Image (cartoon, rainbow, N blue to C red):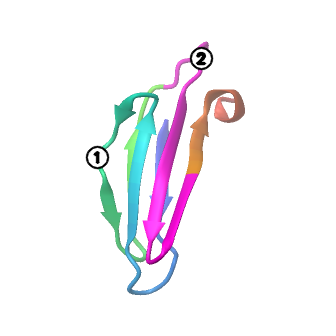
């Protein structure tokens, strides 16, 4: 499975992305406007995988679930 995170926030506004799977941290990335960050993994059909990411730009900070096995595994 591949997850792509695009920065469409606005010209000149970099996006900081920090993702985790449970207790496994992925490297923090700085994504510039019109670029993307991607990561891949092998979902476990009977697992409860949950990838979530922190997104920060300017004075904004948000946390989103980008992959939830029960929701996204088809």
User: What residue appears at the point 55 percent right and 52 percent down from the top-left corner?
Assistant: 63
Residue under circle 2?
Answer: 45
Residue 2 seen from this side? yes
| 62 is within the stretch colored magenta | yes
Answer with mark 1 or mark 2, whichever residue precedes in sequence. 1
Could you say where residue 23 lies in the image, as x and y percent from the top left?
Answer: 40, 28
Could you say where residue 20 lies in the image, as x and y percent from the top left?
Answer: 42, 38
User: What residue appears at the point 59 percent right and 21 percent down from the top-left corner?
Assistant: 48
What is the crowding at mark 1: few (fewer than 14 residues within 10 Å), some, or many (at least 20)? few
Residue 49's label in the rendered image is none
51 to 4, vertically: above or below: above
Could you say where residue 69 lies in the image, as x and y percent from the top left?
Answer: 62, 28
The stretch of residues the image draws in magenta is 43-63
Q: Is there CB contact under 8 Å for labels 1 and 2?
A: no
Could you say where residue 46 lies in the image, as x and y percent from the top left?
Answer: 61, 13
The residue positioned farthest toward the bottom in the image shown: 11
40 to 44, vertically: above or below: below
Tag nearer the camera, 1 or 2: 1
- Secondary structure, mark 2, is loop
| Residue 42 found in image quarter | top left
- Quadrant, the C terminus: top right
């Amino acid at each position: 499975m591949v997850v792509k995170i695009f920065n469409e926030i606005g010209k000149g506004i970099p996006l900081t992305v920090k993702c985790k799977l449970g207790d496994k941290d992925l490297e923090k990335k700085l994504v510039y406007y019109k670029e993307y960050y991607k990561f891949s993994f092998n979902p476990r059909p009977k697992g409860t995988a949950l990838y979530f990411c922190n997104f920060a730009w300017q004075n904004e900070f948000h946390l989103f679930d980008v992959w939830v096995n029960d929701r996204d595994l088809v």
